[in-house]
C-alpha cells in the first residue's frame, strides 16, 4: 500500500476530540445531545475563510446550549453527548445529502472554505467529525438498552432572538415530528410556568426534514425524543443558564421514567 496517497487525518494530535460524553454512567433513562456545542474549527481548516466575529455568531454554534446540556446532565443524572467542532465544518443535525451539511453561505455570511469542497474534503470531515459523533450517540443508547432501559433522546439547541428582521417571542421551542409521547406533556408543563412563552414546533419545526439526529436516534428506532430550543439571549450568562436549565430539568424530571413514555413504538 502506498501510504503517500493516504489523506492526513483532519484533526491533529493534541486537538480536542470530535465528541465527548459527560456523565457516561448517568442512571436516568435519558441520553442528552448537543450537536452545535462548539465554534471550534480544526487547525487544518484555519478560519474557514470566515472572520472571527462571524465564527462567534450563531451561524457557527448554538450559544449557551452546551452549558445548559451539561447542567441538565447533572440535574437529571443522564449522559450527554457533546460535539467538539463547529456546525460550519459539518452540521451534525443534517442528512448527508443536505445542502446545509457543509454550508457555502450561512445567514448571509460566505463560508469560503466550503465553496469548492472536493469529495475527499467532504469525506474527511464526515470521517473525523460526523460519524464519530453519531457513533457515540449509538453507543450511549446501546448501553441504556443493554441495561434494560428505553431511553428518551433529548437534543438541546438555542436560537436567535431576531431572524431576518423578525423578532421571535418564544423563550423555548419544543420540536417534534409524529411521536408526541414526550413533547406533548412537556409542552403542557412548560406552558404552565408563569410568563414563559413556548413554541410548539416553533421557531423551527421537527417536521421540516432537517432534524437528522432525532430522526436517526429517536423516530426510526421508535424511542421517545424531543428537540428543545432556548432563546440565546436568555442563556448567555451563568445566571441565565442556571435558571432555564433548572426550569427544564424540573419539567423533564416529572416525565422521565414514566411508563407511558419509555417504551419502543410498535412498527418502528
Image (spheres, rainbow, N blue to C red):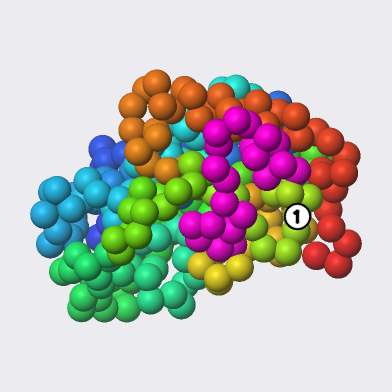
Q: Which span is picked out in magenta? A: 185-206
Residue 36 appears in view = no
Label 1 sits on residue: 180
Q: Position of residue 204 (x, y in %)?
A: 50, 60
As displayed, is residue 180 above or below residue 100?
Answer: above
Magenta run includes residue 204 = yes
- Asked if residue 255 lies left or right of residue 45, the reply is right
Asked whether 96 or 166 is in front, the reply is 166
Asked whether 237 or 199 is in front, the reply is 199
* Residue at the image position 55 percent from the left and 42 percent from the top: 197
As displayed, is residue 162 above or below residue 71?
Answer: below
- Furthest residue toward front: 195
Asked whether 190 or 40 is in front, the reply is 190
* Residue at the image position 50 percent from the left and 34 percent from the top: 69
User: In the rendered image, which quarter is residue 241 located in?
Assistant: top left
- Asked if residue 176 lies left or right of residue 209, the reply is right
As displayed, is residue 187 above or below residue 71?
Answer: below
Q: Position of residue 234 (x, y in %)?
A: 40, 35
Q: Position of residue 214 (x, y in %)?
A: 61, 57
Residue 68 appears in view = yes
Asked whether 16 or 251 is in front, the reply is 251
Count the marks. 1
* Residue at the image position 47 percent from the left and 65 percent from the top: 94
Local secondary structure at mark 1: loop
User: In the rendered image, which quarter is residue 115 located in?
Assistant: bottom left
Q: Quadrant of the C terminus?
A: bottom right
- Asked if residue 114 lies left or right of residue 217, the reply is left
User: In the rendered image, which quarter is residue 17 located in?
Assistant: top left
Q: Residues within 10 Å of mark 1 (few under 14, many from 20)?
A: some
As displayed, is residue 236 above or below residue 13?
Answer: above
Q: Position of residue 265 (x, y in %)?
A: 84, 58
Q: Quadrant of the N terminus?
A: bottom left
Amino acid at each position: 500500500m502506498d501510504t503517500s496517497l493516504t489523506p492526513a487525518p483532519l484533526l491533529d494530535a493534541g486537538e480536542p476530540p470530535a465528541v465527548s460524553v459527560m456523565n457516561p454512567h448517568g442512571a436516568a433513562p435519558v441520553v442528552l445531545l448537543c450537536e452545535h456545542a462548539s465554534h471550534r474549527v480544526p487547525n487544518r481548516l484555519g478560519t474557514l475563510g470566515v472572520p472571527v466575529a462571524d465564527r462567534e455568531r450563531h451561524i457557527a454554534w448554538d450559544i449557551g446550549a452546551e452549558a445548559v446540556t451539561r447542567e441538565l446532565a447533572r440535574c437529571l443524572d443522564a449522559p450527554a453527548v457533546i460535539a467538539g467542532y463547529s456546525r460550519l465544518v459539518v452540521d451534525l443535525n443534517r442528512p448527508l445529502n443536505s445542502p446545509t451539511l457543509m454550508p457555502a453561505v450561512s445567514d448571509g455570511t460566505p463560508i469560503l472554505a466550503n465553496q469548492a469542497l472536493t469529495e475527499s474534503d467532504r469525506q474527511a470531515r464526515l470521517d473525523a467529525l460526523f460519524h464519530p459523533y453519531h457513533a457515540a450517540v449509538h453507543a450511549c443508547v446501546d448501553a441504556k438498552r443493554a441495561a434494560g432501559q428505553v431511553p428518551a433522546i433529548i437534543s438541546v439547541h438555542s436560537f436567535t432572538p431576531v431572524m431576518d428582521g423578525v423578532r421571535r417571542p418564544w423563550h423555548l421551542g419544543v420540536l417534534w415530528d409524529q411521536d408526541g409521547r414526550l413533547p406533548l406533556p412537556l409542552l403542557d408543563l412548560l406552558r404552565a410556568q408563569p410568563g414563559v412563552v413556548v413554541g410548539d414546533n416553533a421557531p423551527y419545526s421537527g417536521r421540516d426534514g432537517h432534524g437528522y439526529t432525532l430522526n436517526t436516534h429517536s423516530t426510526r428506532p421508535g424511542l421517545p425524543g424531543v428537540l428543545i430550543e432556548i432563546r440565546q439571549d436568555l442563556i448567555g450568562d451563568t445566571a441565565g443558564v442556571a435558571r432555564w436549565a433548572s426550569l427544564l430539568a424540573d419539567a423533564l424530571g416529572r416525565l422521565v421514567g414514566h411508563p407511558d413514555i419509555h417504551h419502543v413504538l410498535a412498527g418502528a
